[in-house]
Amino acid sequence: MCCRINTLSLLITLTPTNTPGTMEEKNTRKAAVAGQFYPATREEATHELDGYFSTFKDCDKRDDIQAVIVPHAGWVFSGEVAASAFARIKPERTYDRVFLIGPSHQVYLNAASVDTASTHYSTPLGEVEVDTALCQQLAQDTQLFKYDKKAHLHEHCLEVELPFLQYHLKKMPPIVPVIIATDEPDALVKLAMTLRPYFNEHNLWVISSDFSHYPDYEDACKVDTRTAEAIASGNVQMLANIIDRNEREHIKGLSTCACGLSAIFTLMLTTHIDTTTKNDATTKVEHIMYRNSGDSPFGEKQRVVGYHSFIVYPEKRQPQAFALTRDEMGTLLQIARERITSDCNRQPMPHIDITDNLTKKLGAFVTLHKNDQLRGCIGHFGEDVPLYQIVEEMAHAAAFEDPRFPKVTADELEDIIIEISVLTPLKRIESADEFIYGKQGIYMRKGYHSGTFLPQVAHEVDWTKEEFLGHCARDKAGIGWNGWRDAELYTYEAILFEEG
């Protein structure tokens, strides 16, 4: 299933609701793939799990993990990768419930199927209770949640995760089984909105997905690396761009970049929805492990399936050294607009009142867009000029001095959108490993040559981190594709805003 997601911007306030449990007749979903994807007996299953988890017995364990992304193939191929994420959870950690979310391999519904029929799921390690009250509530909240027996009866993607949880957690919570059987962007946004109240410290989300399907070993590693970097960035648009790139390249044998892409997108969309302005944490997606079926003694190199694992947890926001109010952003945009308009009409620029905050000495870039196309972009690093003044100067430069474009004319003004990036001070890094792709901009310098890419460039292209650095080195700094490897590297962040 291929997800067709384009630019998505969400700012939604939701309030969690709780529904008390109800008494009902027991209806156990029997294991459908025990004996095929994993052992059919408790003894054999436990023995295999012993081996997987022993590899990670000394790993750092967290009590704040809110989600994992894990594979769902046969354990002999992906069991160790799945265990690598589950093992990061402290076994003593208690959750109210586990949301099991995965893709449909059986039916397409243009909706999600939540299991409202089962009261328990059975595995060789015992039975797991279903939070039937919450499942019923989700089905009532929106038409996008429904129950389809065919979506659950023989589906393996949720079932194979359960023994890992039963084995690792000292207390197994009830589950909420959700099969996402759509790849429509609007539907995924609505699903994320509905599920958002339950993405918190009380619940664990298990996102079930394998990755590249059926390229050869080397192509799988290349495609899966791109996809993993995009997921770890936490940026929905970056992931959509990478998926588009992978498909455009027509890699031999590649049928999908991730069979659980709809579930992954739902998680990422959910983390982008703000529920409170008082939240002082951001969501961190950490990549844990990669293998593909070619790494297994039971696999081959010519036709493989990729497996990644990730953990997701809240990360404390660093205090921002500089911030702008909405009014101050509006003032800077007004300054930029008035400077370009005055220059076009050869008139003096009107007086604009500024706050003390806008006299701080910071760098800034001014970018002009016309009909969604770049029309000019010039910026200035350093803390040597007051912010309001540098914005005015860069607005003039972007409109009239960018050598890539003709000068802006008065006839164009109505069609031009102004974007401003206020830059935090440059921070020297010793290695590109310290560069947070998708969040930070990069500035590189070697001798008399230098160049930069703003943070938002990563969201507009379909490059990997290494390609981002290579393009900056070659296309911006003029030091060759690999010139960044021995250049001085600096990172910075940007406060980004635009007209409208």
Image (cartoon, helix red, strand yellow):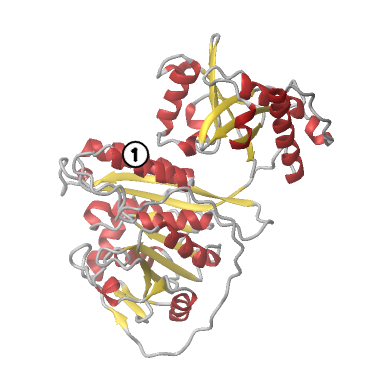
Q: Residue at x 48, y 27 (%)?
A: 432
Vertical arrangement, residue 135 with respect to residue 180, above or below: below
Q: Residue at x 64, y 28 (%)?
A: 410
Q: Is residue 163 above or below residue 224?
A: below
Residue 308 can be seen in this image = yes
Residue named by callout 1: 245
Q: Residue furthest top?
A: 448
Residue 464: image location, x then y, percent: 40, 34
Closer to the camera, 430 or 219? 219
- Does residue 89 appear in the picture of this structure? no
Which quadrant would the N terminus be assigned to in this image? bottom left
Q: Nearer the viewer, residue 350 or 57?
A: 350
- What x and y, as percent, mark residue 288? 40, 46
Q: Type of residue at label 1? A: Arg
Residue 59 spot, x, y in % from top left: 43, 48
The image position of residue 461, as x and y in percent, is 43, 35
Relative depth, front residue between 314 and 409: 409
